[in-house]
Image (cartoon, helix red, strand yellow):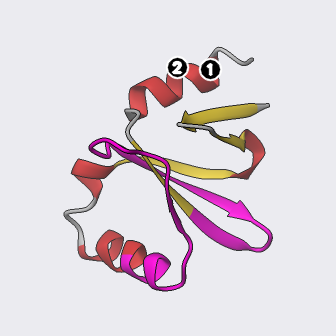
Amino acid sequence: MYLHLGQDTVVNIKNIIGIFDIENTTVTKNTKEFLNKSTKNGNVINVSHEMPRSFIVCRENDSDVVYISQISVATLKKRSLTMF
């Protein structure tokens, strides 16, 4: 099963490690460091042309990939639950 993250981007649900609210989680030092490191390593994909509301961490090809999305965590959760 696949989850639509925004624009033309879908990911396999099996690869998702976590879905996070960007506003609430980026206030912590560890999350900021993780996102900065991921950006420097080229592992961040922005799938939003609007204000980002969430980020999704996936494990793909033995590395973590971070998707930045304009879709809220609640909506992504609903989408993932309707698939089962």
Residue found 26% across the figure and 44% down from its top: 51
* 10 Å crowding of disc 2: few (<14), some (14-19), many (20+): few
As helix, strand or loop, the secondary structure at mark 2 comes to: helix
Q: Is residue 47 part of the magenta span, yes or no?
A: yes
Q: What residue is shown with label 1?
A: 81
- Tell me where the magenta segment starts and ends, as one range: 36-65
- Dots 2 and 1: beta carbons under 8 Å? yes
Q: Residue at x 74, y 64 (%)?
A: 60
- Helix, strand or loop at mark 1: helix
Q: Which mark is residue 42?
A: none
Q: Is residue 32 left or right of residue 83?
A: left
Q: Which residue is mark 2?
A: 78
Q: Is residue 66 left or right of residue 75?
A: right
Q: Residue at x 50, y 30 (%)?
A: 76
Residue 8: give x, y in percent of width and height: 62, 38
- Looking at the image, how many numbered discs can be counted on the residues? 2
Quarter of the figure that contains the C terminus: top right
Task: Write down the quadrant of residue 39 in the picture.
Answer: bottom left
Q: Is residue 58 left or right of residue 71?
A: right
- What's under tag 2, amino acid-wise? Lys
Q: Amino acid at mark 1?
A: Leu
Against 65, is 34 above or below? below
Disc 1 residue crowd, few under 14, some 14–19, many 20+, Cα 10 Å: few
Gap in Å between the C-alphas at discs 2 and 1? 5 Å
Q: Does 79 appear in magenta?
A: no
In the rendered image, residue 58, in percent from the top left (x then y), is placed at 64, 57
* Quarter where residue 2 is shown: top right
